[in-house]
Amino acid sequence: MKTKLAILTLVGVTGIVLAAPQTFDFKDPKGINNAGFTLDAPLEAINGNASGVSGTVTFDPSNPGATAGKIIVAAGSLMVPNPMQRTHMLSDKWLDATKYPEISFESKEFKNIQTAGDTTTADVTGTFTLKGVSKDLTVPVKLTYLKDKLGDRLPNQKGDLLVIRASFSIKRGDFNINPGQYEDKVADTIELNLSIAGASPK
Amino acid sequence: MKMILRMIAAMLVAGAVIFWVAAGANRGWTKTQIPIKTVDAVTGLEGIQWQAKFVPGVDFLGAALLAAGVLAGISIFIPLKSKQPKTENNK
């Protein structure tokens, strides 16, 4: 009887552990994680990206709808090919990266969740903060859970990976970035692309 | 002096155009960093590494043409040949 109870307890505890949400850290030692951006402009579109990605996401493979977390992008890591454009972009006239060093998205709710194999798609509502202005946005995301793949990416480490991809657009005017100004030179709409992977070591 | 300035202006235009074409005839702005795409084999994510490289754009061409125009403009106000001062023997 005691043995049966012990086995049942072990099975129960194992089940709880396996089903427990995992925390994924999005600070990427390989430097692949990035947030890309595109703005239309008369001579050529301004294409750039930011590599200073950090933050954590809690993900439960058995319940993707319970996913929650916050992704932060360091404003100072934004890069464009033209040095003068970059200086202007980070200056107090545009992003004011010194005063507002972080751009972030914090999730509140997952809706329209669809899971097929290791991939989950959903519409995430959360708070997007840029230049000190916070607004609620709903963003389509794709989550890919890669079980036991951390070791393939980072030798000598065991654990899982969570890949997040998201594409959405914002209006710079909504975030107090020269609202209604210079729209003949730089479009109001900014296209954003998030391509990040987080690690959950075991 | 007049001819030298005009030759420098012509060489500046020719040099800038040749350099611009050789560097890929970039019709956008001048770039000092170019994005190099890398794909992570495990996650399939596409990362960007920035590489320092000078790629002249239309602003570079414009600046070279402006500089050449200024030199050519200055040359207009320079007399063709300076007059030789008359010596006693020429009288």
Image (tube, rainbow, N blue to C red):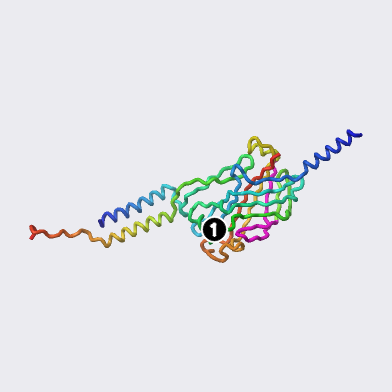
Extreme residue in the front direction: A99
In the depicted structure, whether residue B20 falls above or below residue A4: below
Kind of residue indicated by mark 1: Asp
**Which residue, given by chain and number where applicable, does mark 1 sit on?**
A40
- Between A87 and A179, which is closer to the camera in this rendering? A87
Q: Is residue B70 above or below residue A145?
A: below
Q: Residues within 10 Å of mark 1 (few under 14, many from 20)?
A: some
Q: Which residues are magenta?
A: A125-146
Q: Residue furthest top?
A: A3
Q: Residue at 66% of width from left, 49% of height from top?
A: A55
Residue A71 image position (x, y, % from top left): 65, 51
Q: Quadrant of residue A9?
A: top right
Question: Looking at the image, which residue is at 61% across and 54% down?
Answer: A102
Magenta: predominant secondary structure element?
strand
Side of A35 where A143 appears, left or right: right
Q: Position of residue A7 (x, y in %)?
A: 86, 35
Residue A82 location, x and y as percent? 49, 53
Quadrant location of residue A3?
top right
In screen coordinates, is A69 left or right of B72? right
Asked which secondary structure carries label 1, the reply is loop
In the image, residue A136 sits, relative to residue A152, either above or below, namely: below
